[in-house]
Amino acid sequence: MTTAPGLFVARCLVRVAVWILVAGAVAGPAALVRPAASAAPGAESPLYGTELPADGYVSSTSCAAAACHGRGHAGGMRSEYLAWSPDLRPGKPNDPHARAYQVLFNSVSKRIASLMELPKPAHETSLCLKCHAVEAVQPAEALSEGVGCCGCHGPAKKWLTVHYQPAWKALSHREKWEQYGFLPVQNLTTRAVNCAGCHVGDATREVNHELIAAGHPRLTFEFAGLHVTPGYRKHWEEPLAPAEFESRAWVIGQATSLRNATKLLGERAKRAESDSEADWPEFAGYSCVSCHRAIRKDTPRPVPRAQQTRGKSGWEMLSVAAVDVAAEFTPRVFVGAAVPRLVALGELREVMAKGSPNLQLVRQKSAAAVAELDDWLTALQAAEDRPRAHALAPEVSQQLLNALAASALTPDRGALRDHDPDFLAAHAAGCRAVLRGSPDVRLSGHMRELVEVLPVPHTPNGRLTDWGSGLTNARMLRVRDQFRDIFDRTRPGGKR
Amino acid sequence: MSAGTWRRGWPLAGAVALAAVVGLVAPSNPASAQKPELLVGKAGPLPKDISPGISACATCHSGADQRSVNLFVTLHKSHEFIKFDESHTWRGQDVHAIAHLALSGPLGKQMGEDLGYDVAKAPQCLTCHALDLTPTAPLAEKQFFATQGVNCTGCHGTKETWQVRHYKEAADGSGIAWRAMTPAEKAEAGLADLRNPAVRAKKCVSCHIGNPDEGKVVTHEMFSAGHPPLPPFELVTFQESEPRHWGYPSELPYFKNVPANKTWPLYRFHPADRESYHARQMAAGAVAALRAEAQKLLAEAREAQKPDADGMDYAAFDCYACHHELRSKSDRQSRTTRDGRGGRPTVRKAAGALAGVFAGNAAGIEVGGLKARAAGFDEKWAELRAAVVSKTFGRPQRIATAAADVIRWCDGFLNVLEECPQPIYTKEQTDRLLPALAAATERTTADPDGALCLSWAYLSLRKSARGSHDQERLREFARAVPPSVRVAPFAVMEKEKWVPIAPRYGDRMDWVADFETHRFRAAFKSAVGSR
């Protein structure tokens, strides 16, 4: 019996060692993420530009004067309105925001309305108008503009006659927002958070599973990738160098999607707690393919996932899969920003691995996780508002690529860490963003192949709803080989 | 030595025997070995009055030409009564024989790795993959006979009493007394009344769908670790997919000479001109399957109401409500009727599709009081469907009430099928069933299992009716749907060499994955013709 304490200690040590190994194996790059030492709360002023004012929205025609944004040269200076407005010639590039309202009249929208037994047609239903138009726009006829200028730039009533005067330029981004309700979307964080309001959802806007089951396409928000959607006619130019823009946009996009998804989750939990009719769990918050996988002869098996119970679905897989890489790279991409603390997020993910997650726990944990993510975004927003003193270190793109490939693979690089297409797409989309910014001749061919093998959000033909069908073991092996190759070639001293 | 002592001592011996039998080199785990959960092998005492092995059966049931059965053939004409090569068929061609062996094959090993337990020893696996010798015991205290998979005694009864009595000749030379006994008397002695369609159906579905009261449940965790998806249950098709070791009454000479008033009371059938043997079996299968589905839902709903429960297990719902590929133009959105909000897991619709046909048909059958017992199906089934989609994963309390109601309905229906001595499915009724089955295919949308179940039922009934229908068109349709439960036949070699299980059900799964309602309906219509 004398050896018992020694044995006990030894057992504990073994257990600790096992846990470290397991944690390392499971978390992968997450193990590298340390809580930010300098992220004292309140160090930065809080995140701004998140809650849009209720009114003051004007018609886009207010912006369209020929001397202002309505010059007749799409793509040229002061022709923003024309670049945005619908181009009726088929196959011409355009801005889908201008057609957001019109789609509410098409056959899919009609079928959705009928399947959901909506009391009014889609174009008169607030649920739809919240994202397919600027719902509070005045006059109401301007609803038909779809997502017009004010949808992204903020309600213009207060700043319409001010924003071209010399004093405007002297205002900071924050001042423009706080005093006038103008959204400084040049700040990529501010931009991303506002895109995500519709493209992910927020407290008042969402695409839930009932809507998707009735035929609404699923949402796939990947901020960096959205900027290069094929056929999308941008009405602005990015001031940042491509390498800088892509890596920043990717990190910001990761933080933003997850923040909005987590906020929405908290709202849904709150709703379900007070209303027994509300859906819980809400399937729209999970990876579609974790359930919607046909069981074919050659369907790849799901592989054990980090923080996930076997046979249970993956919560926000597209948003969480690569978030640890984004966190890890925050200080390298944004000089002066620290690695964010994402402890509550980890706890939330554990709670969400249950079949019927506990409402109260979800509400608590999601509030704490949103606070963490808000801190992260605050730092990113502040970094975006600071004048850039340093250019992106040239090796960061390569390191980021390497970290993304490593995160997609098991620690021994022998297999994919998960077969969920959302998990793979999250990593593939990150790789694509990095490569857009830093075209690497050796890798671009591989990326093309990777894209062929794997549907990522916003594939050229935009088949969002065919996501994940036709998965086979052979395809999974090819994807694994692609990531392995990217990993090998981006390693310091790796193969050329 | 008390019973308790040998029970405690048994499992280890059993585990060793198992390891020897299946060639496992599993490290022994003292912790789990102490649990009395597995009884396998030949050595040692068995529970009193229980004889689960087949060596005794095989002595006689290995062929009518054997010397050992000479007397039974020449004197008692037993070969006109049974096929007599049952053990041979079972051992060589019946997958039930590898039910337990399959657990130590590649898929079993893979599942074990994923699940974190040895599936060849876990009671939750053995309840279906072996013989449960203690049916009323809780899962943790069960004892099993595993080495022969699901053998003769698994279905016919493990009690030694009937095994000894069923061939004993009377001392006065009047023949085999057992033959004159009624099925009820035989059941009393331990022989299950499997000739009775309802009894047989309940026995089959207890594994092929599940029975939580007997610890037979395939959980979603097991499925996700690789357990093959269970096909929809249709008794006649399942039987036809088997290497039948038994004959239909029409195939066995003995039954031609049984007086009409004895066919049902003694042998549970009516002559073909009075009742369709297969229709009654099919009805029993359909209703027993629905009962088993409702029973699963009831158990899950009860479980989900406990504090700290993690909701209902996904396996209680329709697999293909979720497990379908996402398509831009999906026929899932063409459905015209819904039970509530869309986008929620549904009840396994196939379970009600076939039962519904028989319920509707029974509205015109007064015999045995079937009409009265069958009344109210539509409302009860609709309420169960609605309860399951009343919320995401349903409201457990409402599900429990609705499921219990459906179970009561099924019991009433099954009771008539089990007890009613008169013919129920006359030629007239059977002729009405075929168009009813065809009409039911028009009501099922985005439900591959339901479509399969109805198709199987239609083809089976057509085959047994052998009407004037265009056989060529029917054959064509049979090519358009997976014609049977298993596609590839079982071969003896599978016992010696592991054959992957996927090819046996893979084609069916591909068919399910590619299923489109309108294509299926068109194929069905073209085969069946205008009604």
Image: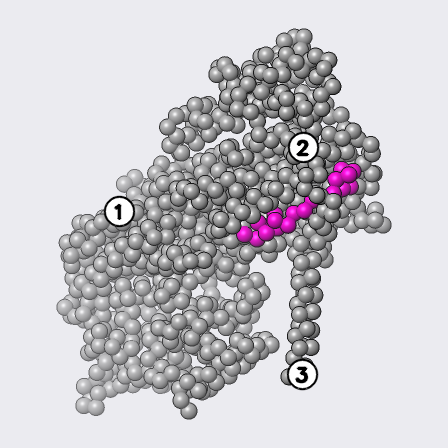
- Residue at disc 3, secondary structure: loop
- Residue at disc 2, secondary structure: helix
Residue A418 placement, left or right of B250: right
Q: What amino acid is found at the position of numbered circle 3 in the picture?
A: Thr
Of marks 1 and 3, the one in the foreground: 3
**B516 vs B469, nearest the viewer:** B516
Chain letter of the residue carrying label 3:
A
Of marks 1 and 2, the one in the foreground: 2
Residue at 45 percent across and 40 percent down: it is: A271
Instruction: Name the residue tied to disc 2.
Output: A189
Identify the mark at residue A2; answer none if there is no mark: 3
Chain letter of the residue carrying label 2:
A
What is the residue that sits farthest to the right in this orientation? A493
Determine which quarter of the picture holds residue A84.
top right
Q: Residues within 10 Å of mark 2 (few under 14, many from 20)?
A: many
For the question of whether residue A475 can be seen, the reply is no
**B477 vs A91, nearest the viewer:** A91
Instruction: Name the residue tied to disc 1.
Output: B378
Image coords of residue A480 (percent x, y): 68, 50
Determine which quarter of the picture holds residue A237.
top right
Residue at 20 percent across and 50 percent down: it is: B375
Image coords of residue A71 (percent x, y): 67, 10
Residue at 50 percent across and 79 percent down: it is: B34
Marks 2/3: CA–CA distance? 61 Å
Span colored in magenta: A331-351
Residue A21 on the magenta span: no
Image coords of residue B79 (percent x, y): 30, 76
Are dots 1 and 3 on a single chain? Answer: no
